[in-house]
Amino acid sequence: MRTSEALPAACDSGAYLVFPKASDVSARPMLSASWFAFVLRWALQRAHRYTHFVGLVTIRASRDHVGLTIDGGVQMTTEVADRIGPLIRDTDLIGELDDGRLGVLLADADEAAAASVVHRLGETLARIRFAESLVFAIGAASCPANGVDMPSLVAHATDHRELIVCAKNPAA
């Protein structure tokens, strides 16, 4: 798919950007699932063409509810994105993946760099008190080492979780 062909399709599909509130100018925007997929595919094409690395970190927030484990939801994904935004470089992007997980696209990041980001994010998420008790599953993958297209990169990051972090109980 050519970039010029994919952009109008992304625009027509109701893609959106979530911008920070005017009162919080330090926050970075979180890309919607369709925009994040578009940018990730584009970055992978560039990495393949120019032989450099692209890293992907995935974060799934879940919570217990009546004995079941359920996803944290859109509001929790947005809150996590706001909290981790200051921890990543200006060249990296935060967005939502198709299944509701949070994705962080790391420019020029190999496996070691992605693993370093995973541990730094894990340490931060473990210290934050959220409105609910959460468990974060954080995984990483790097192109070309773990895949050269979006589905294989996302699958590797999902299947090879590097870190499970429990957020502090809000009552503690």
Image (cartoon, rainbow, N blue to C red):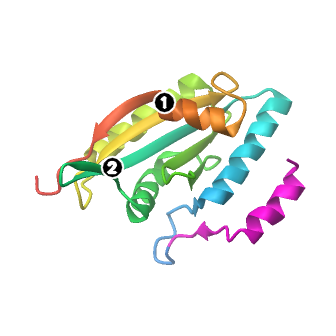
Q: Based on the picture, tell me whether residue 11 belongs to the magenta stretch.
A: yes
Compared across the picture, whether 38 is left or right of 161 comes to right
Badge 2 amino acid:
Ser
Q: Is residue 170 left or right of residue 102?
A: left
Foreground: 90 or 58? 58
Q: Residue at x 27, y 57 (%)?
A: 130
Name the residue tied to disc 2.
Answer: 62
How many numbered dots are placed on residues in this image?
2
| Residue picked out by circle 1 | 159
The circle on residue 70 is none
Residue that appears at 18% across and 55% down: 66
Q: Amino acid at mark 1?
A: Asp
Residue 51 visible in this rendered orientation of the protein: yes
Q: Secondary structure at mark 1?
A: helix
Left or right of residue 49: residue 112: left
The crowding category of the residue bearing disc 2, from other C-alpha atoms within 10 Å (few below 14, some 14 to 19, many at least 20), is many
| Chain part drawn in magenta | 1-20
Question: Marks 1/2: CA distance?
Answer: 16 Å
